Structures are given as structure tokens and as C-alpha cells.
């Protein structure tokens, strides 16, 4: 029978009539669950500490969308740096593709916020109130009584409390901790928008983590649905060793005179299903519902240990490995993803290294003629749009140059700009008509169209930017 034929026609968390099966996972012990808990604690720690820890006087993570400025680990970005987000996003997506081709859904089982919050914060509440799986299943069958109602209310209250905590931590990323504390003290009526966001996020997190849970992964998440194209026969995924495990069967002593049946190592205890957050049976082969949490590996290893059999009946392995005994890492899609990561990351690193703490744009003021002529002179007017992207006041010097004999007026040759503010500085350049004619049409050589050069220097950071713009003039006859 092929893997597809063995796999259930519907999801494990759904009955044939379409109703939902409420999943109660059994407790599991083992090396992977220990490591996952360490990873979960680190990730939640980083998430909570982001707005609390200060680097260079600003929160390590502060996404100030309202002011369009973003503080990330000591660096400051603004709306003009959107391309960095784009490059970072590309690097991240290609990295996920590479990891998926190499080790399957490592992201889902180990670092996805859906898994991290559910398994580290919300599932323990369920375990605390309802007890172990067997007790919880038994209680679910019993009619509603005072004890059951009280347990239900307590559990929902704790879920709501946890959802509110996660929502507050999320909003703090966007408003900063001191501002958030001040907002809470001043009350929701003064800060309607952050309050509304906190309420909406609390509701969404409560709905998702208290009820929707694994349905998000198996029904909504697009990444989960793309697995069949992201994996290949060499991807190392969580798999059941069919050769070793089958034919499966319960442990039973043969009756006197009977021969012990030929059995594989799987004793059909179903522990791998009971610990699974999507209740799927890994023995039916790779399925879209597998979140690669490795809980079935730990559960089966526990069983094998008790039976004095080698561990690893369920383990990380590729289909090729089962077929040929060999694991292959290097293959075309790995090279393609690695090349894409290198390119995206290379461009990102280069751009970050070249990035300055200010932006400058040299434009012509709208509504003005490109040039102004009088009897002797021709004028061009420009405007420098200078943006200070630093969280501190910055001083700039501005110098402009043009052809010899030109007259240049820079509106503000030295200027201080407030943090995250911008300023428009006018520059007027004029030159005698005869002098311009001499430069353009007097020489033997082909005329070179002249440009006004501007040097802008940030005096604190010693960063220099140069801009240039064409000097415009009428045709030779009008000049
Ligand atoms: S936990 Fe292991 S032994 Fe038990 S049913 Fe699953 S694969 Fe078989
Ligand atoms: S099959 Fe195993 S690895 Fe996949 S989701 Fe279930 S328990 Fe986790």
C-alpha cells in the first residue's frame, strides 16, 4: 500500500462529518522536548526583553510606526529604509526555503510564534487545570457540574490573562515601555488607538490559542500548505521506519504451543499519536499536518527504552535514507537557495555598510521656471531635502560648487536638524551669460553640459554625501 493510500482521507483533527476533534496532547519526556523548551524560553525572553533593554539610549526593539522610525538593536531606520526590510525579507524567505529543503518544517516545530506561545504558555495552563490527558478526556465525557463549570471558567480566565499579557508585550513593541506605562496610567479614553489594539490583539490571541490552535497550522498557514513543493526525497524530516516497525502489533505472550507472531518493533501503543499536537499518525507517512515538533520521536523513544529496543523507530531521516541508507545534502535546490541567500544577504550587508545616518535629495522647487534670465546673468534654483535619521540632533555643512565665475548662495551653509526631522535648504546658482556661452560653445571640444555639485557632511558622524544637478539654460540663440 502506498503512503498516500495509507494516509487518512481527512485531517486527524476532523471527524468524517466535518466536526472538530478537540486535541488533548499527552505529556512527553525526552531530549527534543527539553531542547525545545530551552528554545521557547529564549525566544519568549527575547520577545519580552526587546522593548525593555536599551541600546544606545533607545529600546532594542521599538517599531514606532506612528512616527515612521524603527529602532532595532542599536540601529535606527526610517521610512526611507524600506528597501532594507525588503532585502531582509528576501534573505529570510530564502533561508526558510533552504532550511525546509534540508530539514523540513524545523521552523514550525521550533520557532514559529504559533508553536512557541501555544506550547510554552497556553498548553501548560490546560495541563494545570485539566490534568493529564487521560483525566482531561474522562472529564470531557462527564456531564456539566459545579466542578467542571468552575474548572472551565478558571481555564478561560487564565487563557484570557495570558492572551492579554502577550497582547501588551506586542503593543509595547510599537509604543515603547515608558510610553505604554504612561498610557495605561492616563487611561484608555486618552489613548483610544493603543487601547483598541490591545483589546483586539487580546481577543485574537485568546481565540487562536484557547480554541483555534492547530487549525491555524493545518487550515490557514500557507507555509504548511506548500510543504509538498518545498520538500524532496532528500529532505530530512520526521519519519517512521516502516521496515523496522511493521508489521506492528500489541505486545502479547504467545499461548503455550503457539509460535510468537512475526512482529516489527512498533507495539501499536499509539503514544506517538497521543502526544501529537495535530493528532496525526506519523506511521501513515509524511503528511501536511506534521509540524515537525519531534514529540512523537521522544514518545516512541520512551517506549523503545522500556522495551529494551534501539531508539529511533521514529526519527529525523529522508526518504532516500530509508531506501538507500544514504543521506544526501547537496542537490540543485540547495545550491539555488544558497545562491539566492548569498546574493540577498550580500546586497543587504553592502547596503547597510554604505548606509548613512541622513538622507539627502537635490531637487528643483516646484512651480519655478528651470532658469531665469536677465540682461547679464542666468539663474538656476535648487532645493536640498535633508533628512536626519538619527535619534539625536545632527549638524551638517553644505558646500556647493559650479563653474569658475559662478555665484552660489546656499540658504544654510551650516545647519542643525532635530532628531528624525527634515529641512529644505534653498541653493541659488547664477553665472554670467557670456561666461556660460564661452564654456559651452567657445572651445574646440564638444561642449559638456555643466552640473552643480553639492557636498553635504554630517559633522558628528563624519559622513559625506555628494549630489549633483544639471544647470539648465535656454538654447544657444536665446542665451
Ligand atoms: S510510539 Fe512507537 S511503538 Fe508506539 S505506536 Fe508509535 S511508533 Fe509504534
Ligand atoms: S507527527 Fe510527530 S513531529 Fe509531526 S506534529 Fe505530530 S508529534 Fe509532531
Image (cartoon, grey):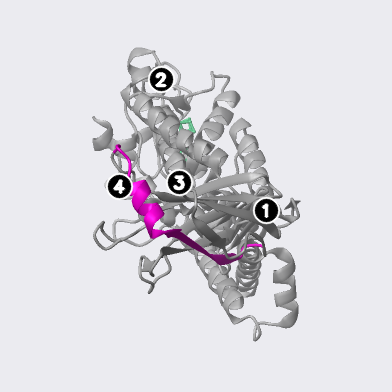
Q: Are marks 2 and 1 in contact (CB under 8 Å)?
A: no
Q: Is residue 324 left or right of residue 271?
A: left
Asked if the stretch drawn in magenta spans residue 427, the answer is yes
Question: Percent position (x, y) of residue 370?
Answer: 36, 65
Query: Which residue does the numbered mark 3 point to in the structure image?
Result: 89
**Mark 2 vs ligand 2: CB under 8 Å?**
no
Asked if the stretch drawn in magenta spans residue 8, the answer is no
**Mark 4 vs ligand 2: CB under 8 Å?**
no
Query: Which residue does the numbered mark 4 point to in the structure image?
Result: 441
Depth check, mark 1 against mark 4: the one in front is 4
Q: Specify whether residue 270 is in view.
A: no
- Give the spatial CA distance, label 2 vs label 1: 36 Å
Q: Nearer the viewer, residue 198 or 216?
A: 198
Query: Which residue does the numbered mark 2 point to in the structure image?
Result: 329
- Give the spatial CA distance, label 1 vs label 4: 63 Å
Of all residues shown, which one is farthest toward the top? 325
The disc label shown at residue 50, or none: 1
- Tell me if residue 148 comes above or below residue 406 in the rendering: below
Q: Are marks 3 and 1 in contact (CB under 8 Å)?
A: no
- Tell me if residue 371 comes above or below residue 334 in the rendering: below
Looking at the image, tell me whether mark 4 or mark 3 is earlier in sequence order.
Answer: 3
Q: Nearer the viewer, residue 262 or 364?
A: 364
Q: Are marks 4 and 2 in contact (CB under 8 Å)?
A: no
Residue drawn at x 54%, y 63% is 210
Of all residues shown, which one is farthest toward the bottom? 189
Depth check, mark 3 against mark 2: the one in front is 3
Q: Specify whether residue 161 is in view.
A: yes
Amino acid at each position: 500500500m502506498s503512503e498516500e493510500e495509507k494516509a487518512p482521507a481527512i485531517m486527524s483533527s476532523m471527524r468524517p462529518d466535518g466536526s472538530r476533534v478537540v486535541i488533548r496532547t499527552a505529556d512527553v519526556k525526552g531530549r527534543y522536548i527539553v531542547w525545545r523548551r530551552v528554545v521557547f524560553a529564549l525566544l519568549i525572553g527575547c520577545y519580552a526583553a526587546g522593548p525593555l533593554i536599551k541600546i544606545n539610549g533607545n529600546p532594542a526593539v521599538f517599531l514606532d510606526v506612528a512616527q515612521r522610525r524603527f529602532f532595532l538593536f542599536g540601529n535606527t531606520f526610517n521610512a526611507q529604509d524600506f528597501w532594507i526590510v525588503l532585502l531582509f525579507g528576501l534573505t529570510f524567505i530564502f533561508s526558510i526555503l533552504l532550511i525546509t529543503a534540508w530539514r523540513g518544517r524545523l521552523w514550525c516545530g521550533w520557532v514559529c510564534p504559533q508553536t512557541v506561545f501555544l506550547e510554552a504558555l497556553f498548553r501548560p495552563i490546560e495541563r494545570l487545570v485539566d490534568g493529564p490527558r487521560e483525566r482531561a478526556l474522562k472529564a470531557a465525557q462527564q456531564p456539566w457540574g459545579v466542578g467542571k463549570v468552575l474548572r472551565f471558567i478558571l481555564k478561560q480566565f487564565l487563557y484570557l490573562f495570558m492572551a492579554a499579557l502577550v497582547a501588551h508585550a506586542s503593543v509595547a513593541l510599537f509604543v515603547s515601555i515608558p510610553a505604554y506605562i504612561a498610557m495605561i496610567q492616563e487611561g484608555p479614553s486618552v489613548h483610544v488607538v493603543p487601547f483598541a489594539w490591545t483589546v483586539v490583539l487580546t481577543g485574537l490571541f485568546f481565540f487562536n490559542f484557547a480554541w483555534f490552535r492547530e487549525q491555524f497550522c493545518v487550515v490557514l498557514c500557507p507555509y504548511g500548505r506548500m510543504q509538498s513543493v518545498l520538500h524532496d526525497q532528500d529532505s530530512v524530516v520526521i519519519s517512521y521506519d516502516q521496515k523496522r516497525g511493521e508489521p506492528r502489533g500489541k505486545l502479547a505472550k504467545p499461548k503455550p504451543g503457539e509460535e510468537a507472531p512475526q512482529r516489527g518493533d512498533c507495539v501499536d501503543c499509539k503514544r506517538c499519536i497521543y502526544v501529537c499536537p495535530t493528532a496525526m499518525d506519523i506511521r501513515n507517512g509524511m503528511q501536511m499536518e506534521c509540524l515537525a515538533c519531534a514529540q512523537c520521536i521522544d514518545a516512541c523513544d520512551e517506549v523503545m527504552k522500556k522495551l529494551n529496543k534501539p531508539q529511533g523507530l521514529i526519527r529525523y531521516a529522508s526518504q532516500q535514507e530509508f531506501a538507500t541508507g544514504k543521506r544526501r545534502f547537496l542537490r540543485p535546490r540547495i545550491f539555488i537557495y544558497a545562491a539566492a541567500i548569498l546574493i540577498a544577504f550580500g546586497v543587504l550587508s553592502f547596503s547597510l555598510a554604505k548606509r548613512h545616518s541622513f538622507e539627502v535629495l537635490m531637487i528643483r522647487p516646484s512651480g519655478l521656471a528651470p532658469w531665469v534670465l536677465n540682461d547679464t546673468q542666468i539663474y538656476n534654483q535648487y532645493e536640498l531635502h535633508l533628512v536626519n535619521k538619527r535619534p539625536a540632533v545632527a549638524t551638517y555643512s553644505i558646500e556647493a560648487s559650479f563653474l569658475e565665475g559662478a555665484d552660489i548662495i546656499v540658504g544654510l551653509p551650516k545647519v542643525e536638524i532635530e532628531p528624525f526631522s527634515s529641512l529644505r535648504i534653498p541653493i541659488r546658482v547664477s553665472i554670467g551669460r557670456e561666461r556660460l556661452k564661452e564654456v559651452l560653445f567657445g572651445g574646440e571640444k564638444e561642449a559638456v553640459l555643466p552640473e552643480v555639485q553639492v557636498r553635504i557632511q554630517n559633522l558628528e558622524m563624519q559622513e559625506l554625501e555628494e549630489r549633483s544637478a544639471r544647470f539648465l539654460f535656454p538654447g544657444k540663440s536665446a542665451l
